[in-house]
Structures are given as C-alpha cells and as structure tokens.
Image (cartoon, rainbow, N blue to C red):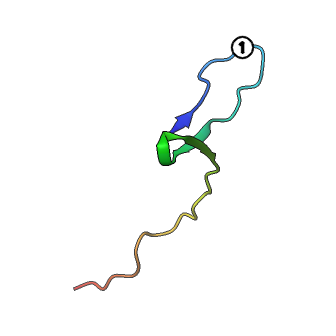
C-alpha cells in the first residue's frame, strides 16, 4: 500500500511511503529497492 500527500502548501512535499501488511493486518513501513532494467527471462532459440 502506498501513502502520499497529493497537495501541501508552504512546505516541501514528503516522499510517498510504502507499507506492507503483516499478520493481524498491521501495516509496516518498507523501503523499496530499484530493480536493474534487464530483459525478462533468458535467451530463447528461434525455430
């Protein structure tokens, strides 16, 4: 789940915060990691 502020006056807009739902429905903040941009899968042979 992502939480963010869409409009805010007179101050810098904070970055969006992502949360993960854990046991009992508790939301815990998480840090997302950037995934390298590569081709999905491996090499495929052409028929």
- Pointer 1 local density, CA inside 10 Å: few below 14, some 14–19, many at least 20: few
Q: Position of residue 35 (x, y in %)?
A: 57, 61
Could you tell whether 2 is left or right of 14 in the image? Answer: left
**Up/down of 18 relative to 10, above or below:** below
Q: Position of residue 42 (x, y in %)?
A: 41, 79
User: Which residue is at the front of the view, 26 or 29?
Assistant: 26
Dot 1 lies on which element? loop
User: Which residue is at the front of the view, 4 or 28?
Assistant: 28
Residue found 54% across the figure and 37% down from its top: 2
**Up/down of 15 relative to 44, above or below:** above
Q: Quadrant of residue 34?
A: bottom right
Could you tell whether 16 is left or right of 45 in the image? Answer: right
**Up/down of 42 relative to 33, above or below:** below
Where's the C terminus, which quadrant? Answer: bottom left
Q: Position of residue 17 (x, y in %)?
A: 62, 38
Q: Quadrant of residue 39?
A: bottom left
* Residue linked to disc 1: 9
Could you tell whether 16 is left or right of 10 in the image? Answer: left
Total numbered labels = 1
Residue found 51% across the figure and 48% down from its top: 22
Farthest residue, direction top: 9
Farthest residue, direction right: 11
């Amino acid at each position: 789940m992502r939480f963010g502020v869409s409009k805010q006056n007179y101050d810098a807009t904070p970055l969006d915060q992502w949360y993960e739902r854990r046991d009992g429905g508790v939301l815990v903040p998480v840090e997302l990691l950037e995934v390298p941009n590569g081709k999905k899968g491996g090499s495929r042979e052409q028929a």
